[in-house]
């Protein structure tokens, strides 16, 4: 089996999925998957290239791409995954990942660790809001593979600012001088949306 | 060389004239002697194609300019036209794919989109190349293109007719020789012109392919009743969306039918006679969603039932309300709805079937579900188990397990279904 589309409740990720060793694409919708074993089991599918989470596919707040997992994954799509706050790419994960598409999500803790994706070409945010977008931009700009950050709206639309909580406030004051500098960067990023290289 | 030659022509003209020149390129190709060189070069590459590839390549002239052509679409149509020669030890579909790859590697067509696993999924034909094959096709009475800005006087015996942007006009054409009719027309009106008058001619009896790609035409129930009389048809695509209520049982006479693509319709049940069509490779038959009488939303449903007389009286909502009533009555209203179509017993006879979508398991009998397991060539299966009993789901699991060629599976369960997809993911299924 190469392609599997599942519409409906799964709840807990079962070992059944470990059998799908030939699976290339998986599409999940209304699965209501819990955080615990989901990414561990999916991450071990040796041929998986396309991972699509659609509304209510995943109930966890964190989506963690762990070290040594998703060895063949090329594309991640998150479409309106309501509860999701944070996407984390750990060091040594998803060595083939090229495209990350986030659609209609509100990531209140941000996207962290894209610098660990050596093949990354595109991150696109479509009608999505992301916290700490400045940090994401820094990671994108410093990335040796020169990926593009595509924004469907103005930067201010996508920017959720910094994470709520006292620790974040301290960070926020530290970040203020940078933020103004970055705004000009982002405007150029938007205009060079389709070019192969990001702005320096 | 082709690029150099065009450059040579452009160099003799002023910049302002380039755009003009570009637009005239097709007609210039036939008259201007210096462009004759490019034409010769490209025609040469056509002449050097092996004879089996020539009709396949000329056939590309039915597609509009810049059209992104899907490999599967093209290969299915080649096969339906009889252009692909079977080889021992491989399937005809594989041979068709080889033809496609050969045209790519000879640079006759350009690859456009690659699949996840690296194979070419779509292609395009270069503008100049297309101009050349269109003109060869015209000379050989192979393809006739109906375009609003073109010369539509067709008095010859064309084999293939494609409508690009114009309305369907009555033409003084000899329809008796036509093998394929293709409609690429995209509607700005969105009205969906009824095609029934054009396709009900008995003269179309030689037709092999009827393909509604664009959105501007519709097939109605009357239309499909006439279409099933075209007994040589091998490829039928009635378009993405149409108000067809039933597939006539006369479909059993279409013995050559390979591809049946109904898109989204109001059909709720496949007729038993479909199981006589032993050469069917593809069945796509999806259901239009309810507009008013959504069984899953009882309150809305009740409200809309009460105002049904008003819905039926209003010209805007009438058609939709009738559609709902038809689908509801013929599928047995039930709160857990269930889209898709009921598949008849005998489905197991369709040994060649590769794609089957979309099966309503609740309304398909246990015996027919069991027979699904006999479709050993099946590559792609889409099912809905909304409202189906546990027993049926268990039989379904056993059937899926037997499908050794299955590559793609789509399963939809209802919101109210006990344990959701549990029946699938707790089985030892698909372990290989």
Image (cartoon, grey):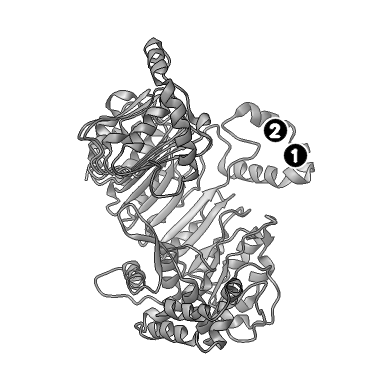
The reply to whether discs 2 and 1 touch (Cβ–Cβ < 8 Å) is yes
Residue designated by label 2: B304
The residue lying toward the viewer, choosing from B72 and B370, is B72
Q: Quadrant of the N terminus of chain B?
A: bottom left
Residue located beneath label 1 in the image: B311
Q: Is residue B195 toward the left or the right of residue B137 in the image? A: right
Residue B299 drawn at (x, y percent): 64, 26
Query: Could you say whether the residue bearing mark 1 is in a helix, strand or loop?
Result: helix
Residue B424: quarter of image? top left
Identify the residue at image location x=32%, y=59%. Answer: B119
Location of residue A33 (image quadrant): top left
Subunit of mark 2? B
**Measured along the vertical axis of the image, is residue A13 above or below residue B167?**
above
Does B25 appear above or below A102?
A: below
Percent x, y for residue B425?
31, 34
Label whose residue precedes the other's in the sequence (2 or 1): 2
Residue A19 lies left or right of residue B247; in this view the side is left
Tell me where residue B8 appears, x and y as whole percent.
Answer: 47, 81
The chain under label 1 reads: B
């Amino acid at each position: 089996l190469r392609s599997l589309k599942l519409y409906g409740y799964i709840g807990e990720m079962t070992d059944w999925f470990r059998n799908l060793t030939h699976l290339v694409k998986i599409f999940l919708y209304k699965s209501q998957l819990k955080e615990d074993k989901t990414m561990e089991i999916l991450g071990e599918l040796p041929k998986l290239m396309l991972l699509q989470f659609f509304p209510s596919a995943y109930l966890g707040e964190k989506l963690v791409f762990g070290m040594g997992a998703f060895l063949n994954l090329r594309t991640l799509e998150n479409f309106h995954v309501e509860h999701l706050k944070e996407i984390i790419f750990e060091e040594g994960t998803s060595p083939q990942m090229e495209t990350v598409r986030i659609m209609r999500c509100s990531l209140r803790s941000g996207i962290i660790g894209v610098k660990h994706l050596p093949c990354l070409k595109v991150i696109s945010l479509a009608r999505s809001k992301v916290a700490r977008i400045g940090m994401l931009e820094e990671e994108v700009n410093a990335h040796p593979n020169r990926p593009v950050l595509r924004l469907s709206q103005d930067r201010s639309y996508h920017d959720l600012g910094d994470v709520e909580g006292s620790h974040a406030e301290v960070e926020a004051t530290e970040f203020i001088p940078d933020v103004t500098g970055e705004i000009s960067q982002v405007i150029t990023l938007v205009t060079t949306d389709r070019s192969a290289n990001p702005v320096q | 060389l082709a690029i150099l030659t065009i450059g040579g022509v452009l160099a003799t003209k002023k910049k302002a004239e380039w755009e003009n020149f570009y637009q005239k390129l097709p007609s210039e190709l036939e008259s201007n002697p210096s462009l004759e060189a490019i034409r010769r070069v490209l025609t040469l590459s056509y002449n050097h194609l092996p004879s089996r590839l020539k009709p396949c390549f000329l056939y590309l002239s039915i597609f509009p300019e810049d059209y992104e052509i899907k490999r599967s679409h093209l290969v299915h149509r080649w096969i339906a036209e009889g252009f692909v020669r079977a080889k021992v030890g491989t399937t005809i579909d594989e041979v068709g794919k080889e033809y496609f790859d050969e045209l790519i590697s000879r640079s006759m067509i350009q690859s456009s989109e690659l699949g996840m696993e690296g194979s070419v999924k779509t292609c395009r034909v270069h503008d100049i190349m297309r101009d050349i094959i269109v003109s060869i096709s015209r000379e050989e009475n192979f393809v006739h293109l109906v375009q609003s800005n073109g010369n539509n006087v067709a008095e010859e015996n064309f084999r293939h007719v494609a409508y690009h942007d114009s309305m369907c006009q009555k033409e003084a054409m000899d329809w008796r020789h036509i093998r394929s009719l293709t409609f690429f027309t995209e509607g700005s009106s969105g009205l969906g012109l009824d095609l029934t008058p054009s396709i009900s001619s008995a003269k179309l009896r030689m037709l092999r392919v009827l393909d509604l790609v664009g959105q501007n035409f519709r097939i109605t129930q009357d239309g499909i009743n006439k279409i099933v009389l075209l007994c040589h048809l091998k490829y039928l695509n009635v378009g993405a969306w149409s108000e067809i209520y039933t597939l006539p049982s006369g479909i059993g006479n279409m013995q050559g039918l390979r591809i049946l693509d109904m898109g989204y319709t109001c059909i709720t049940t496949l007729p038993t006679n479909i199981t006589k069509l032993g050469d069917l490779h593809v069945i796509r038959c999806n259901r239009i969603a309810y507009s008013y009488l959504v069984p899953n939303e009882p309150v809305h449903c009740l409200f809309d039932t009460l105002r049904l007389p008003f819905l039926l009286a209003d010209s805007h909502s009438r058609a939709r309300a009738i559609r709902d009533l038809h689908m509801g009555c013929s599928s047995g209203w039930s709160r857990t709805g269930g889209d898709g179509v009921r598949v008849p017993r005998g489905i197991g006879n369709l040994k060649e079937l590769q794609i089957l979508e979309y099966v309503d398991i609740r309304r398909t009998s246990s015996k027919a579900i069991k027979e699904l397991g006999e479709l050993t060539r099946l590559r792609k299966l889409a099912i809905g188990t909304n409202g189906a009993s546990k027993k049926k789901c268990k039989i379904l699991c056993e059937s899926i397990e037997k499908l050794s060629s299955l590559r793609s599976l789509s399963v939809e369960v209802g919101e109210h279904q006990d344990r959701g997809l549990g029946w699938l993911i707790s089985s030892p299924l698909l372990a290989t």
